[in-house]
Amino acid sequence: MDSQDSGVARPVLEGPDIARVLTRIAHEIVERAKGAEDVVLLGIPTRGVFLGRRLAAKLEEITGRKIPVGSLDITMYRDDLRMHPPRALARTDIPGDGIDGRLVVLVDDVLFSGRTIRAALDALNDIGRPRAVQLAVLVDRGHRELPIRADYVGKNLPTSLRETVKVQLAEEDGRDAVLLGAKPTAPAGER
Amino acid sequence: MMRHLISAADLTRDDAVLILDTAEEMARVADRPIKKLPALRGRTVVNLFFEDSTRTRISFEAAEKRLSADVINFAAKGSSVSKGESLKDTAQTLEAMGVDAVVIRHGASGAPYRLATSGWIDASVINAGDGTHQHPTQALLDAFTMRRRLVGRDAGLGQDLAGKNVTIVGDILHSRVARSNVDLLHTLGAEVTLVAPPTLVPVGVEHWPCEVSYDLDRVLPKSDAVMMLRVQRERMNAAFFPTEREYSRRYGLDGDRMAKMPEHAVVMHPGPMVRGMEITAEVADSDRCTVVEQVANGVSIRMAVLYLLLGGNEPAVTHSRTEEK
Amino acid sequence: MSKILIRGAKVLGGEAQDVLVDGETIAEVGSGLGAEGATVVEADGRILLPGLVDLHTHLREPGREDSETVLTGTRAAASGGFTSVFAMANTFPVADTAGVVEQVWRLGKESGYCDVQPIGAVTVGLEGKKLAELGAMHESAAGVTVFSDDGKCVDDAVIMRRALEYVKAFGGVVAQHAQEPRLTEGAQMNEGVVSAELGLGGWPAVAEESIIARDVLLAEHVGSRVHICHLSTAGSVEIVRWAKSRGIDVTAEVTPHHLLLTDELVRTYNPVYKVNPPLRTERDVMALREALADGTIDIVATDHAPHPHEDKDCEWGAAAMGMVGLETALSVVQHTMVDTGLLTWAGVAERMSHTPARIGRATGHGRPVSAGEPANLTLVDPAYRGAVDPAGFASRSRNTPYEGRELPGRVTHTWLRGRATLVDGKLQ
């Protein structure tokens, strides 16, 4: 009965909203990074990678320059690694010129506890030494457990811990949307 | 659920593909300035080697260190083992030191299985080669090498080796590499043909999921990969074949024979090679020979296995060994 | 001496009868026998057999008292219903002189649980090179009639021929451990499908069969008798069947474990299944059962081979070969032969008492259960069902392949010449 799950979830951002929001973030990056000359975008798998590529495309439109974009898998840096069976690894793909001395903008779909970003900072540390690291997220739903904040936020979405935020992107899910739903209360063990 | 890797036959197709895919990501670490991942931080792995095998040992050691494990190397030679200490006592001594996993190489077939199932220790056991039984990480790295060469690095992700023809040539009887490869390649959908003089094929081979041929020249034209196994010269003295020269003539791979293989086909060898015996220098040094790649891939595969067995609270790889009735 | 009345026992599995034992002898067999002055044992329909005779036991003393002694081994024998055991010669020192066989024989007398008949080595030090003093061992107090290098094969055809000829002088018999040594170098288990998979050195059936074929022909040629130890393959059965049909004086034994277990068990790499000759295939097991039923194989012998825990608590390749068997033999035979309808209890008595006693010339054993015969008796409860628990063994060693396995039947009483050695399953 998965109709119940999706039936409860309500869209807070639709396709056009997401496009608009990404355009805004792209402009903010250009502005704050003074032309985005040394920017490297690194998306966090899975959906952060797609968002990173979309952002890069928008940046290229704005600046007329090729923007290096890649992916950063944080699986082995998670602080809950030992609490679950090992997860399949995702791709880490660092653009050819590396990240040393550059401005790395991490891109993720939802900012929640902040633990993913902490893991990403650790992962970056094993790859090189950026000039600075910034964070862009599509949604900030609050409830931080670590002293981490986003530099670029698509939408601030106050939520309760009983709610779920689900980002759908055309590349993975066939459509663009951010859905706010109620956490399924019933069977424990379901994610 | 078991937490060990004892036999290639224990792996399901999905387990094996997961290991190969994970190894593909691990391989990318080798291209980074810092070749290190934190996955096994705080885990202690002992390399318990009752047989000399510098290659396998350093391959595991490199994999363990790249995953940030604490590594203890234990070579039986010159230790209390050579003074009569049993495998059980050695293993328990190591476990008392807080070892999370034992990578074991042993001359007796079944020693790793025994270590994993006898209740002597709680640590995970990874078989790094036992007697003439199994060498599962070798089979995995061979399959990984084949998938890269025959399917593609990225195109291979999530794929098995369905429809590929693999020929394994040499001393099948005494080879743990052959046994592991037959099991794994069959699981991955490849068609395996063993080629050897009849004296070097085990009685009972007809129950293996593969073909057997005594004629190398007939098999070469349809092979996508040809794996040459080392043939030890001592075998000659036990009358397995008459002379070294006759062996190389009938079962060795030289340039002329290699020319009979399809354009895309590769030559593999688990090493160490006996040049002039089972393989000529011309073949060993050609672009089609993957020996050096296999060594590099060995580290990635062992990283993948270690991560999937030890990286979480329980293994990601599931096992299904046929138990006794 | 006291009297014992065994009331309502099915003698050899037949009608329930009373058996009165007076002193060392059976006084009377009939129904409604008076009980005056006798200790009464209510048999309640249990099976009464002549005391079992094991032609193939390793008692390990002298030399390996850590695995078994004559005393612990004979206690195990009494627990299993045996009143006579033949002790193999591969001790330290080897039983290849009159001195060693007399020592074992004397230890057996002292134990009091079971008669011990030493087997003498065929060759000095079991080395297969030089005949041991077979005549001296025969003439010693031990009166050796069975000679064997068991554990090793007398592989030299000339030595085997001479031994077969030589023992004719005093009615002896050579019991051959049939194992061609060159074909079994490095052998760890039966050669076949399982060994190919497990990568354990193969022990081909032909290594056993070729020696048996040679030896029956040698026995025919020199007009001697030969006994084949622990026959384990379907091919060996065919050869012995052929030899018997030709009139060759050959007898053969099978162990309980070869009647039940197969090499599939080796997949566990648990050395408790490591034995010489190795466990074979299902097809062999079935052929052995059939051969034991039709008389091609004459007897069951345990090849009771005790080993200390550490010799089995290790990797397969390093482990010792052998299994204890005295205390489970009858249960395995009931399970594989009686409960399957292949043998009657009278057939069991034939194969585990009468015939082994005849082959080994064990006087006073393997006799009929009738008046005037020595009171060597075993009472069996065939209805009993229970899991094998090695902790309860009388043997000093625990290397049984049946731990935890449910087997039928239990020996409740054993009498050695009228003296109870086992009562209600408890050693006396």
Image (cartoon, rainbow, N blue to C red):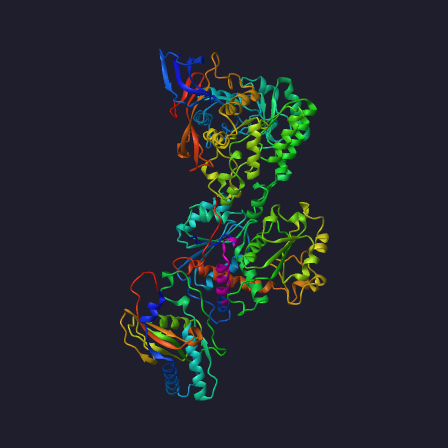
Image quadrant containing the C terminus of chain C: top left
- The residue depicted at 29 percent of the width and 64 percent of the height is A185
Residue C192 appears at what percent x and percent y? 59, 43
Q: Is residue A9 above or below residue B184?
A: below
Give, as a single range, the part of the protein colored magenta.
B8-24
- The residue depicted at 43 percent of the width and 80 percent of the height is A54
Q: Quadrant of residue A191?
A: bottom left
- Count of labels in the image: 0
Label the magenta part by its dominant secondary structure: helix
Image quadrant containing the N terminus of chain C: top left
Query: Can residue C383 be seen from the camera position used here?
Result: yes
Query: Can residue B271 be seen from the camera position used here?
Result: no
Q: Is residue C292 above or below residue C37?
A: below
B29 vs B260, left or right, is: left
Residue C342 appears at what percent x and percent y? 52, 29
Q: Quadrant of residue A173?
A: bottom left
Q: Quadrant of residue A59?
A: bottom left
Camera-nearest residue between B84 and C316: C316
- Whether residue A98 appears in magenta in the rendering, the answer is no
Residue A119 appears at what percent x and percent y? 38, 70
Q: Is residue A82 above or below residue C379?
A: below
Residue A73 appears at what percent x and percent y? 43, 70
Q: Residue lying at the far left in this picture: please name it.
A: A160
Camera-nearest residue between B51 and A63: A63
Q: Is residue C383 above or below residue B157?
A: above
Camera-nearest residue between C163 and C384: C384
Camera-nearest residue between B162 and B4: B162
